[in-house]
Amino acid sequence: MINFTVGPVQSSEAVRSIGAEHTPYFRTEEFSKIMLENEEIIKSFAGVGESGRVVFITGSGTASMEASVMNIFNEKDKVLVVNGGGFGKRFVEICQIHGIPYDEIIPEEWVGLKSSDLEPFDGKGYTGFIVNIDETSTGVLYDIKLISDFCKKNGLFLMVDSISSFLCDELNMKELGVNLLITGSQKALACPPGISVIILDEVSLKRVEEANVKSLYFNLNNALKDGERGQTPFTPAVTILLQINKRLKEIEAQGGIESEIARIHDLAEDFRNKIKELPFDILSKSLPNAVTALHPTTASAKDIFTILKDEYNIWVCPNGGEMAEKMFRVGHIGFLTKEDNQSLINALNDMKKRGII
Ligand SMILES: *Cc1c(COP(=O)(O)O)cnc(C)c1O
């Protein structure tokens, strides 16, 4: 199988071999040391600065999205949520459930965010801004500089879901004034799903401290306190945290975050060049490095997904809902190579020869 989905993705040999081991007991100095190392490396990759902190939540990315909103905002806030697809909609639902007053910014489909989308909300007394910087459902990357400038001008707290963008697209929290960043284990970190990560700057930490969170598991104060000594309040997904450690060190050994971003960018470019002759449109006008959403012009996207899986043993990422027939996505994250790209192109060329596409 070659897995071109956007998560879970393929893992390196070293990461996979950790998964084959017994899970060790974790209330130990050895495990604490690994957790503190994980925190330090992630802090440096995110550019949060020395005073920042990192919380590891055992739960998928959505757990950290919800925990972040619960610990940062309350009913006295008024937040803006960019809702350009499935993941933006999820933040809207989270705000609804937790009674956070919000307004939605709905950008034009496939275009990304423009300053004219933000203008109507300028100087209107908002307190926070929430965005999935890569709206993975449609493969549209929003302009972080535009958002950052708007938030600085209006004094807004900036919360960024970078679950499919961390390690793929450049983002330095300190430079851009991002107060809180979310990522997860199963995207570019290329580990199994189960851990999500919240990176907090000083402003975030103060808000968390003052928050009145009606949840035991999602109260970040407990996690931050135990995290000081490299521990978690409850049993974490120990093996995945060990795999994350291995993976972070692999990235460091291969030149750090800049070379990882460059590697993924290069894979994405290679793929986008190779599909030019095939009957697909790339609709996104603002492409992230992690994923390319393709609109087939001659066949159903769902059929292409099924045939690639069943007859070629290649997995691309189907879209759901009303886009199921019109759109599928090809991920560029995880343990993939240009040879893998070529295998997918060969399969698609063969399907063209067979008259399927
Ligand atoms: C994958 C992803 C998530 C996380 O979804 P889970 O299924 O809860 O892990 C959240 N936001 C974005 C933008 C994503 O790509």
Image: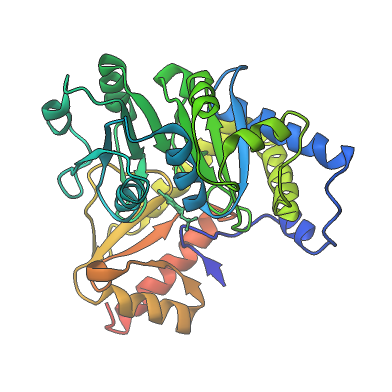
Residue 273 is at least partly visible in this image: no
Q: Residue 82: which quarter of the image?
A: top left
Q: Quadrant of the C terminus?
A: bottom left
| Closer to us: 218 or 26 | 218
The image shows residue 282 at horizontal and vertical percentages of 25, 55
Instruction: Reply above or below: 48 against 81.
Output: above
Residue drawn 70% across and 54% down? 237
Residue drawn 29% across and 54% down? 138
In this picture, residue 233 sits left or right of residue 124: right
In this picture, residue 136 sits left or right of residue 206: left
Q: Residue 318: which quarter of the image?
A: bottom left
| Closer to us: 152 or 325 | 152
The image shows residue 180 at horizontal and vertical percentages of 47, 30
In this picture, residue 243 sits left or right of residue 204: right
Instruction: Reply above or below: 139 against 152.
Output: below
Residue drawn 52% across and 65% down? 3
The image shows residue 1 at horizontal and vertical percentages of 57, 73
> How many numbered circles does the render carry?
0
In this picture, residue 306 sits left or right of residue 225: left
The image shows residue 197 at horizontal and vertical percentages of 57, 41
| Closer to us: 47 or 226 | 226
Report the coloring of the rendering.
Answer: rainbow
Instruction: Reply above or below: 212 against 26.
Output: above
